[in-house]
Image (tube, helix red, strand yellow):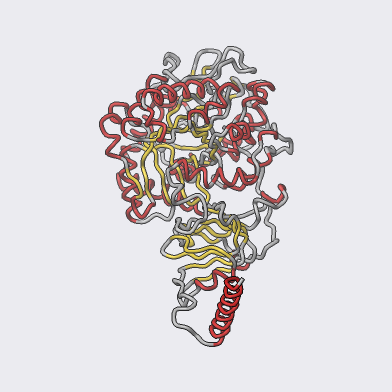
């Protein structure tokens, strides 16, 4: 009893001492109490910050120092990090996320597309011909006219006469008799070339289809100008010869302009890291030089277009991780094309197309070659990314991966990917999670392709196997997101909208049971993409110690009504703690203000 009484007296006395110390501290400064906190370089406050960090899922404010996140919490807590030289941004209720990562894009292709004719805006073939006519009027004789973005299924009228909905070349040849013209299909899996370009490429009525490609002919057997998949190689080789004839300084300037345009395009739309799906050794050397001079955008670049013999000899020499202050990494090969695209009926299927019973698509790169490249990559510790759209292309690719994983279990850790994974046999859906293969998908493709998917593959296959994000996520697979820029606009907002609604431009819904939740879509663009490029320790969530790559949006993508998602805009893009893009008027924006909605989807894969 005495011990308990004594203990009670001791506790009361200790409490009294603590109360006295607290009262004294409130009126009398004590050296080192509270501890001095390091001043931040930048503080964001007054926001709705979705961190994706399970320890602090949502905060009001965060502090950034030396390019990394120093602390997160309430406005009051983070106020302690504000010093004399701290820049403070009052977000006025704006929505903040980890920086969006473009999971599958083509950097220089995007830049070049911004310098070429955007024929995707034309409502029909006649309008495209008029665009080419205007370009020819400004061009020198022999100068190549390049355009991109067309899709015949989107035209408001079918050209007459036509072959499979494709125009005959008469009108195009008439307006461009002395200038080669190349118009790339929006999918990137075909071109329409005029007579001058075909002649320079040596393509005649007697030219056979190359492996993995096809030349479209009219009723008399003459090529109309449509070249699918590998059949465009001869034209692009002719174009390369033309480029080689230009003054080197002109070529260099065009390439630099393409890079600048592409980088600015990405950061203005909230992209903080871009995964480039394929450049040659030569271009990678050049991009590394540019990164060394300073690029705001982080790049994860894959190697593509090199012969197997060159990969075998030089691949390991091109492994680059975290160069230029974590702005340039090369540790993958891809995008290796196992098939073509749905829009050109060259996606490789197990069964024929519903609207073309004699067509099952094409194997573009021989599976034996893909196996060799994958074996080299496994040997040298490289990631592999294989383009597969049709269900057979996906199955064949999964079979190759499974074979190599069985023979070399260490390859499991290399985070191999299938790009697009658009049409999957139900039997193959669980194999992604079982094998640890990443499904690198693009939500926007579903909404763009929706108008003709059922026509191409039938209602049953479309329902069970087309763009099955939800089924893959439920099975435990990692699903990414991106736009395949320049196939689609790199803007993540329409992509996000399609991912969570599956709503087409005409207002109908494309098998909405496969939609993602809002948080799944956000993770696909941030945390999952970071994992897929081995940067999950530094990117993908807003966590103290990680790189301060951050997007600030005008609308809360997790809570606003779905119809308001397309009104959301990027206000700020922050990379490494630096504001690299600020939307005009962003500093005066207030929570609740709405922008005009995005235009409807207008591209097709």
Residue 122's image quarter? top right
Location of residue 593 in the rendering, given as x and y in whole percent from the top left corner? 69, 61
Q: Residue furthest left?
A: 313
> In the image shown, does 585 or 41 lie closer to the viewer?
41
Question: Is 157 on the left or on the right of 21, as rendered?
Answer: right
115 shown above or below 200: below
> In the image shown, does 571 or 547 lie closer to the viewer?
547
Location of residue 545 in the rendering, given as x and y in whole percent from the top left corner? 45, 58
Question: Is 336 on the left or on the right of 93, as rendered?
Answer: left
Q: Looking at the rendering, in which quadrant would you find the C terminus?
A: top right
Residue 179's image quarter? top left
Location of residue 137 in the rendering, given as x and y in whole percent from the top left corner? 49, 41
Give the residue at x 61% y 74%. Answer: 5
> In the image shown, does 246 or 434 lie closer to the viewer?
434
463 shown above or below 589: above
Q: Residue furthest bottom?
A: 28
Give the residue at x 65% y 51%. Answer: 557
Residue 376's image quarter? top left
Q: Is residue 190 visible?
A: no
Q: Looking at the rendering, in which quadrant would you find the N terminus?
A: bottom right
Question: Is 378 on the left or on the right of 84, as rendered?
Answer: left
Give the residue at x 59% y 66%. Answer: 74
């Amino acid at each position: 009893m005495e011990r308990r009484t004594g203990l009670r007296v001791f506790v009361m006395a200790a409490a009294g001492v603590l109360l006295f110390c607290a009262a004294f501290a409130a009126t009398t400064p004590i050296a080192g109490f509270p501890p001095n906190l390091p001043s931040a370089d930048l503080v964001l406050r007054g926001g709705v910050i979705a961190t994706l960090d399970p320890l602090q899922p949502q905060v009001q404010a965060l502090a950034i120092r030396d390019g990394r996140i120093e602390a997160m919490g309430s406005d009051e807590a983070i106020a302690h990090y504000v010093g004399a030289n701290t820049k403070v941004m009052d977000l006025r209720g704006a929505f903040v996320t980890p920086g969006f990562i473009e999971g599958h894009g083509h950097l220089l292709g995007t830049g070049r597309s911004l310098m070429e004719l955007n024929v995707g805006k034309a409502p029909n073939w006649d309008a495209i011909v008029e665009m080419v006519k205007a370009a020819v009027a400004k061009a020198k004789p022999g100068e190549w006219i390049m355009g991109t973005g067309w899709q015949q299924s989107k035209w408001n009228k079918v050209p007459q006469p036509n072959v499979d909905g494709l125009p005959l070349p008469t009108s195009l040849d008439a307006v461009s008799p002395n200038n080669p013209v190349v118009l790339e299909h929006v999918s990137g899996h075909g071109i329409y070339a005029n007579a001058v370009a075909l002649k320079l490429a040596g393509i005649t009525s007697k030219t056979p289809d190359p492996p993995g490609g096809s030349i479209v002919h009219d009723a008399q057997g003459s090529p109309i100008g449509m070249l699918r998949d590998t059949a465009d190689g001869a034209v692009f080789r002719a174009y390369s010869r033309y480029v080689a004839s230009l003054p080197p300084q002109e070529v260099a300037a065009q390439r630099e302009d393409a890079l600048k345009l592409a980088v600015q395009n990405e950061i203005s739309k909230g992209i903080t890291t871009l995964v480039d799906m394929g450049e040659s050794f030569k271009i990678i050397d050049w991009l590394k030089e540019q990164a060394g001079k300073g690029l705001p955008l982080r790049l994860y670049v894959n190697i593509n277009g090199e012969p197997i013999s060159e990969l075998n000899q030089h691949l390991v020499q091109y492994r680059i991780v975290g160069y230029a202050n974590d702005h340039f990494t090369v540790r993958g090969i891809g995008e290796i094309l196992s098939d073509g695209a749905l829009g050109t009926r060259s996606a490789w299927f197990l069964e024929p197309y519903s609207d073309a019973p004699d067509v099952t698509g094409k194997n573009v790169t021989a599976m034996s070659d893909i196996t060799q490249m994958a074996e080299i990559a496994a040997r040298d510790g490289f990631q592999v990314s294989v383009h597969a759209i049709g269900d057979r292309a996906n199955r064949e690719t999964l079979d190759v991966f499974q074979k190599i994983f069985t023979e070399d279990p260490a390859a499991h850790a290399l985070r191999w990917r299938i790009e697009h994974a658009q049409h999957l046999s139900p039997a193959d859906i669980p194999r992604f999670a079982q094998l640890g293969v990443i499904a690198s998908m693009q939500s926007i493709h579903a909404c763009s392709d929706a108008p003709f998917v059922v026509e191409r593959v039938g209602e049953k296959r479309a329902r069970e196997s087309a763009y099955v994000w939800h089924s893959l996520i439920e099975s435990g697979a990692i699903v990414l997101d991106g736009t395949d820029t320049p196939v689609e606009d790199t803007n993540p907002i329409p992509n996000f909208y399609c991912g969570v609604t599956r709503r087409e431009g005409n207002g109908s819904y494309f098998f909405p049971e496969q939609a993602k939740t809002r948080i799944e879509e956000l993770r696909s663009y941030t945390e999952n993409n970071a994992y897929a490029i081995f940067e999950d320790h530094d990117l993908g969530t807003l966590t103290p110690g990680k790189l301060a790559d951050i997007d600030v949006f005008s609308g809360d993508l997790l809570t606003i009504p779905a119809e308001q998602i397309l009104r959301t805009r990027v206000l700020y893009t922050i990379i490494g703690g630096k504001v690299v893009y600020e939307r005009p008027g962003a500093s005066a924006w207030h929570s609740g203000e709405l922008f005009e909605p995005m235009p409807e989807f207008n591209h097709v894969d």
